[in-house]
Structure formats: structure tokens, C-alpha cells
């Protein structure tokens, strides 16, 4: 008797799953559409942010290029005129 009930419950579960399959398919397609839209918006926002950063770097280059050159020259002078390395 237990085997018959198990088979009956499995058959019932299969029938319920088949009846709910169209609803689940619609939900899955909707979720995939939303995920695609969010991904497209994310890629677009990343591109806009990268473009703004590039424009900002180009606009501020008259300031940061000489500053970086000065820092490099100072580092080079400090390295050259530094203490001699101790003999190992």
C-alpha cells in the first residue's frame, strides 16, 4: 500500500508541475528580461563614468602632469643623493 501511495503522490506532483510550467516559464522570461535590462544599464553607466573620468583627466592634465614630473625629479634626486648602501 505504501508503494501505491508513493506512486500516486509522485504522479500528483508531476501533474502539478506540468500545470504550473507555463506560469514558471513566464516568470523566468520576465526575470531574464529584467536581468538583461539591469546589465545593459550597468554597462552604460560604467561607460559614462569611464568617459567622465577620461575627460576630467584630460581637462586637469595641465595641473597634474607638471606635478607628477616634479615628484619624479624629487624622487630621482633623493635616490641619487641618498646614503650609500652598507656592505653586506
Image (cartoon, helix red, strand yellow):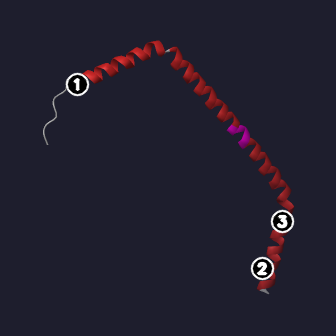
Q: Distance between the residues labelled 3 and 2?
A: 15 Å
Q: Quadrant of the N terminus?
A: bottom right
| Residue 47 image-quadrant placement | top right
Give percent across and percent down for residue 6.
78, 79
Q: Report the front residue among 33 and 57.
A: 57
- 21 to 74, vertically: above or below: below
Which residue: 43% across, 17% down? 65
Describe residue 40's horizontal placement relative to residue 56 as left or right: right
Q: Mark 3 points at which residue?
A: 16
Give the side of residue 32 with respect to residue 44, left or right. right
Estimate the spatial distance between the alpha carbons at disc 3 and disc 1, rounded to whole Å: 81 Å
x, y percentage for residue 17? 82, 64
* Prevalent SS, magenta region: helix
Q: Residues within 10 Å of mark 1 (few under 14, many from 20)?
A: few
Q: Nearer the viewer, residue 65 or 42?
A: 65
| Secondary structure at numbered mark 3 | helix
Disc number for residue 6: 2
Crowd class of label 3 (few under 14; some 14 to 19; many from 20; radius 10 Å): few
As helix, strand or loop, the secondary structure at mark 2 comes to helix
Q: Where does the magenta region start and end? A: 35-39
Residue 78: horizontal and vertical position, in percent? Answer: 24, 23
Q: Distance between the residues labelled 2 and 1?
A: 85 Å
Q: Which of marks 3 and 1 is nearer the N terminus?
A: 3
Say which residue appears at 85% left-offset and 68% top-offset. 15
| Mark earlier in primary sequence (2, 1) | 2
Q: Mark 1 points at which residue?
A: 80
Amino acid at each position: 500500500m505504501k508503494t501505491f501511495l508513493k506512486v500516486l503522490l509522485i504522479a500528483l506532483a508531476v501533474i502539478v508541475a506540468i500545470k504550473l510550467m507555463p506560469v514558471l516559464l513566464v516568470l523566468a522570461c520576465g526575470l531574464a528580461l529584467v536581468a538583461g535590462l539591469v546589465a545593459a544599464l550597468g554597462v552604460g553607466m560604467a561607460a559614462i563614468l569611464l568617459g567622465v573620468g577620461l575627460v576630467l583627466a584630460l581637462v586637469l592634465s595641465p595641473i597634474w602632469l607638471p606635478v607628477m614630473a616634479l615628484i619624479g625629479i624629487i624622487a630621482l634626486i633623493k635616490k641619487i643623493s641618498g646614503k650609500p648602501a652598507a656592505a653586506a
